[in-house]
Image (tube, rainbow, N blue to C red):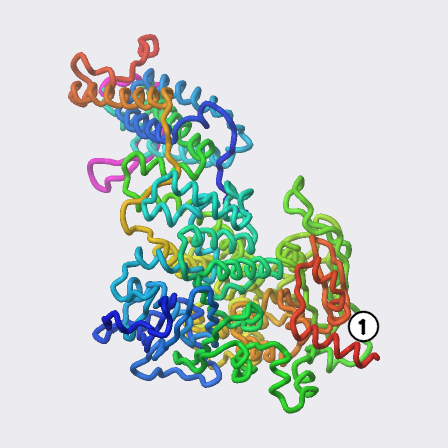
């Protein structure tokens, strides 16, 4: 089986949380964290998210694939950002007096033709700290996000979206995707086997990147066509049982407990607070409410 | 659409029939539309391969002038070859026509005495429940409970009421234990039961089944029969669309409607149906076929003719060396997982045609995949022409042994049939001349050369099936493994398909996985019977299948042909 649903049945505080609380927490935290580059605030968020994740008691062996992917993505994002911007894209931070440690010869964008040329890549206390902040922010969001599929019964995710106020059709589409994901995975492995039986070797694709993609046709075409044809049957099956004729009941009903409500209130409060600070601080590093827009580096590093 | 005055009801009965259809015709797409007919499902394309008719006559009715009526508690069988309009008729009844599929509809349908013309899907669902052909597509809930709740949720039924009704339906179908089970993991038979529960919970008075017997093993068929009989006993009208007539006739339908080219060619009871039906078109019980024949003995000889592969026939004696050997093959998917195959050994000799039989989940496909290296034995070995397959890659093995999967749509992808056939040989790096020759021979052997420049996706199911075999055969493998070669084909195309296999040149051995006992009896020399990962029998078809208790334990049920052959056998012995 190529894809199995990640949900692991267990009894932990995170498993018991209302799925709506988990989704809201992820959304609110993600939006709040995106608004600041203060290393202390992000560090606090990171520690909080790590504690939350620890409560879910997920083992490395269970989540290894997800994490390897996230680590890979994060490294690409953080270093990519750093190299592309020459270390200079720092949100709301004064780089006119950066504390440069060293610099490497590198390529960068110039403001005259040919616009790309040799430019030193500056490593300063500010830029390195910012790189770290970025990494921590991404990981803290990942902690909250990874916990959701592993601790939430897939049967409750559709209804959670419904009870968060999404329309029936959209919410049921989420349920449907959970229903048909394993089917798609099985179709994929059948087609892969069928083509391997015809001498097709996935690991020996020749040609450049476009050539390789073209050579995936034997896998992609049957699966796509099969899904499209199959979708018609599914639509018929749903219509014959009156899907979409009017308001629908959802058999499962989520009930919040005090802890869910507390968590949701907290998540929203953090988001509102950070946003308010951001707006009142005029979005840049000035005035008394500029907490979000400075890195908060300790003085001894800046000597 | 025709509206009707209320007095058109059948006056001879005091209660109106559950369904009455009068002069119903339907044609896909309206006149002003230019798009091609909405025949999207592959099964719906008529298999007119024999005539090769490409040009379609202008006003093409999918169904034309159909009339019947059905009382409560009655069973109607709608039979006919693929593309005869059965599925269209079903769509007219359950309301997908005109609700989802556009076209011209005329005539009238009365459901419980009310005209269906003005009914919304929601209203129709109160009367009519539909079981689609593939329960895999019908089931939209992730768990059994969600699936059964689906229809009632859509009708905005209060939660407590839904719970109560789910409870009742699950109890009725003995599914209580599966309530929280994931629907994906269910077996084929259970899936059908769960799909039925999802329809039954809406309490329709009329039940439609679209080819319910496809791909079920005997136990699942028994359960389905029990369900259908139960529905009738409760006074529900049941309509079954099926080309596996033999199975459905066991249910003693009150009426049979035979369709051909969209028209109704027969309507009457089961007995008189057997007298008019053409045994070449639909599969009848053997007694009915023999009764109609002038020379019964000849008919049986015609029917039972094991395939002897060509190469063996010409190679002559001295070729007793086995071509494929399974030596104590064990297999498990994961190191700590359950063992699926428990030490299987057998040898395949030149010229043999073998049927691999067994219940669903016995490990048949898992076993066959070992020969190709798609799965590798966890213990034991497979030898192909004396060579240990462990040393060879899948691609190398594929050059010697061909495996055709059950569903052609899982593998067909190329823009033309010609390219489809070349795909395998290209992967094996055939030089151009050999490639061309191999492709041409394969295309001729399966009679698909006529479609060489057409897209394989535009062909009928039976034609696609032949293309899929040709594209494996083009790799010049000498052993052919076929998974359910006849599934999804109507009787006539199934027979012509098997006759194509008989004529295949250059083969050493042929092995197919099947549920179909008649297929094994008619076309093979040897049967391997697999159960729970053990090889429980290996021998000539009649010898193996004579053992009643063995059949029972393997969920196989005797067909009329088997019973007839066995009595013939014991008579000639006596």
Task: Give left or right: position of A203 versus B380.
Answer: left
Magenta region: A96-119
> Could you tell me residue A7's position as x and y percent?
48, 36
Q: Residue at left 33%, top 22%? A: A261
The front one of B93 and B189 is B93
Secondary structure of the residue carrying numbered label 1: loop
Task: Give left or right: position of B473 versus B452.
Answer: right
Q: Residue at left 84%, top 79%? A: B574
Res. B382 image quadrant: bottom right
Q: Is residue B103 above or below residue B266?
A: above
The front one of B285 and B35 is B285
Q: Chain ID for label 1? A: B
Res. B164 image quadrant: top left
Packing grade of label 1 (10 A; few <14, some 14-19, many >=20) is: few
Q: Which quadrant: the N terminus of chain B?
A: bottom left
Residue lying farthest right?
Answer: B574
In the rendered structure, does residue B476 fall within the stretch colored magenta? no
Query: Which residue position holds label 1?
Result: B320
Res. B103 image quadrant: bottom left
> Could you tell me residue A103's position as x and y percent?
35, 25
In the rendered structure, does residue A117 fall within the stretch colored magenta? yes
Q: Is residue A292 above or below residue A104?
A: above
Residue A141 visible in image? yes
> Could you tell me residue A234's position as x and y percent?
39, 56
Residue A93 visible in image? no
Q: Residue at left 21%, top 18%? A: A277
Task: Give left or right: position of A76 versus A285.
Answer: right
């Amino acid at each position: 089986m190529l894809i199995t649903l990640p949900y692991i049945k267990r009894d932990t505080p995170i498993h018991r949380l209302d799925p709506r609380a988990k989704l809201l927490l992820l959304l609110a935290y993600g939006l709040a964290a995106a608004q600041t580059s203060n290393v202390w605030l992000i560090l606090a968020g990171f520690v909080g998210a790590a504690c939350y994740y620890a409560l879910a008691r997920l083992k490395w062996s269970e989540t290894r694939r997800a994490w390897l992917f996230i680590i890979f993505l994060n490294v690409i994002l953080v270093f990519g950002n750093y190299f592309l911007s020459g270390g200079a894209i720092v949100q709301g931070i004064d780089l006119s007096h950066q504390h440069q440690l060293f610099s490497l010869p590198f390529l960068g964008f110039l403001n005259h033709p040919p616009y790309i040329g040799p430019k030193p890549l500056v490593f300063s206390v500010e830029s390195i700290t910012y790189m770290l902040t970025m990494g921590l922010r991404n990981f803290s969001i990942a902690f909250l996000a990874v916990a959701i599929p592993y601790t939430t019964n897939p049967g409750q995710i559709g209804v959670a979206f419904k009870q968060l106020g999404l329309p029936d059709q959209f919410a049921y589409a989420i349920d449907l995707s959970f229903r048909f994901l394993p089917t798609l995975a099985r179709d994929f492995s059948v087609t892969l086997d069928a083509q391997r039986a015809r001498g097709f070797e996935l690991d020996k694709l020749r040609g450049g990147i476009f050539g390789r993609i073209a050579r995936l046709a034997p896998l992609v075409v049957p699966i796509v066509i099969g899904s499209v044809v199959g979708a018609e049957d599914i639509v018929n099956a749903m219509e014959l049982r009156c899907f979409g004729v009017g308001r629908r009941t959802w058999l499962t009903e989520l009930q919040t407990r005090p802890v869910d409500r507390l968590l949701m209130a907290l998540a929203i409060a953090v988001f509102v607070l950070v946003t308010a600070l951001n707006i009142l601080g005029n979005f840049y590093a000035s005035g008394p409410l500029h907490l979000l827009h400075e890195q908060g580096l300790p003085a001894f590093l800046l000597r | 659409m025709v509206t009707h005055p209320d007095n058109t009801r059948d006056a001879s009965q005091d209660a109106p029939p559950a369904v009455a259809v009068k002069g119903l015709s339907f044609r896909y797409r309206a006149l002003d539309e230019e798009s091609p007919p909405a025949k999207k499902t592959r099964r719906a394309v008529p298999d007119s391969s024999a005539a090769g008719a490409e040009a379609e006559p202008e006003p093409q009715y999918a169904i034309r002038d159909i009339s019947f009526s059905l009382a409560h508690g009655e069973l109607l069988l709608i039979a006919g070859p693929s593309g005869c309009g059965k599925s269209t008729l079903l769509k007219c009844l359950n309301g997908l026509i005109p609700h989802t599929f556009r076209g011209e509809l005329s005539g009238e349908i009365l459901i419980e005495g009310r005209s269906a013309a003005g009914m919304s899907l929601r209203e129709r669902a109160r009367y009519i429940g539909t079981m689609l052909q593939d329960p895999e597509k019908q089931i939209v809930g992730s768990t059994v409970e969600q699936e059964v709740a689906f229809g009632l949720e859509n009708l905005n039924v209060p939660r407590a009421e839904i719970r109560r009704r789910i409870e009742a339906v699950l109890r009725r179908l003995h599914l209580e234990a599966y309530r929280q089970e994931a629907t994906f993991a269910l077996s084929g038979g259970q899936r059908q039961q769960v799909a039925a529960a999802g329809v039954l919970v809406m309490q329709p008075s009329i039940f439609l089944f679209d080819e319910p017997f496809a791909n079920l093993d005997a136990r699942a068929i028994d359960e389905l029969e029990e369900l259908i009989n139960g529905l009738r006993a409760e006074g529900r009208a049941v309509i079954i669309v099926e080309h596996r007539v033999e199975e459905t006739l066991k249910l003693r339908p009150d009426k049979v409607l035979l369709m051909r080219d969209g028209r109704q060619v027969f309507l009457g009871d089961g007995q008189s149906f057997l007298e008019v039906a053409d045994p070449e078109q639909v599969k009848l019980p053997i007694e009915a076929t023999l009764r109609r024949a002038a020379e019964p003995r000849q008919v049986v000889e015609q029917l039972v003719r094991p395939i002897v592969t060509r190469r063996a026939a010409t190679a002559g004696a001295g070729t007793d060396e086995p071509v494929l050997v399974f030596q104590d093959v064990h297999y498990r998917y994961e190191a700590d997982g359950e063992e699926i195959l428990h030490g299987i050994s057998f040898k395949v000799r030149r010229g043999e045609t073998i049927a691999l039989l067994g219940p669903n989940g016995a490990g048949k496909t898992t076993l066959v995949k070992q020969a190709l290296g798609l799965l590798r034995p966890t213990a034991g070995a497979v030898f192909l022409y004396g060579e240990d397959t462990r040393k060879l890659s899948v691609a190398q093995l594929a050059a010697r042994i061909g495996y055709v999967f059950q569903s052609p749509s899982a593998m067909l992808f190329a823009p033309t049939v010609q390219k489809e056939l070349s795909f395998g040989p290209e992967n094996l790096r055939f030089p151009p001349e050999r490639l061309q020759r191999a492709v041409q021979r394969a295309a001729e052997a399966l009679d698909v050369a006529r479609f060489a420049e057409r897209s394989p996706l535009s062909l009928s199911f039976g034609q696609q099936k032949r293309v899929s075999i040709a594209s494996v055969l083009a790799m010049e493998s000498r052993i052919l493994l076929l998974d359910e070669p006849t599934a999804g084909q109507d009787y006539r195309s199934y027979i012509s398909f098997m006759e194509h296999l008989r004529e295949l040149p250059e083969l050493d051995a042929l092995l197919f996985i099947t549920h179909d006992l008649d297929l094994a009896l008619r076309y093979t020399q040897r049967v391997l019977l697999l159960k729970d990962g053990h090889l429980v029998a290996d021998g000539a078809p009649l010898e193996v299948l004579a053992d009643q208790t063995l059949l029972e334990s393997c969920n196989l049920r005797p067909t009329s042909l088997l019973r007839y052959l066995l009595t013939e056998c014991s008579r000639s012995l006596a």
